[in-house]
Amino acid sequence: MCVNPIENNPLRTKYYHISKLDVSINAITVKTGEDLCVIVTGGMAHIGSVSMAVPRESLDGGKNSSTVSTFNFTGHKDDVIGNRFASQLCSKICHHVSVICGVHFDNCTAQMIELIIQTSDELLEQIIQDR
């Protein structure tokens, strides 16, 4: 039996984008039941890391928090962004979150890296506000 993937698809997909100077960061979120899958890319898109977050109560008590497990491909630093997305989104929605992250810009200076992280954080905030 064929099913129309648009009409009967329980996955709710949203697209996000932000640009600052020479940095563009994109994200796709896919709601899978109560859980969330996120793909974050920028520059030359690739898979550099996978971060998975599980909700838990904060060690300080009372607040939502998360525990993040990460797989990084050798030589990649994408977990810096991926872990932030996974941890903060998981704490917000209190369900499992997986983040595939691949952000690569050639010849980055320290200032460029800071701009990439700042731009990614602003995109993350947009996603959090949308939840």
Image: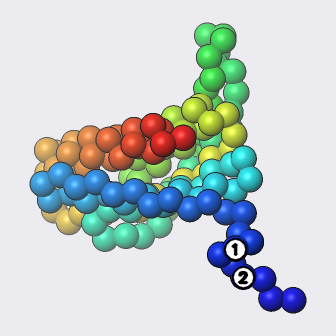
- Percent position (x, y) of residue 117? 29, 44
Question: Label 1 near label 2: C-beta < 8 Å?
Answer: yes
Q: Which residue is mark 1?
A: 7
Given residues 54 and 92, the one toward you in this image is 92
Q: Please tell me which residue is depicted at 62% across the width and 60% down the height of the picture.
A: 12
Residue 4 circle label: 2
| Label 1 crowd bin: few (<14), some (14–19), many (20+), radius 10 Å | few
Amino acid type, residue under disc 1 in the picture: Glu
- Between the C-alphas of marks 2 and 1, the distance is 6 Å
Instruction: Give SS at disc 2.
Output: loop
Q: Please tell me which residue is depicted at 36% across the width and 46% down the height of the picture.
A: 123
Residue 79 circle label: none
- Most distant residue in the front direction: 7
> Is residue 50 something that shows in the picture?
no
| Label 2 crowd bin: few (<14), some (14–19), many (20+), radius 10 Å | few
- Most distant residue in the bottom direction: 1
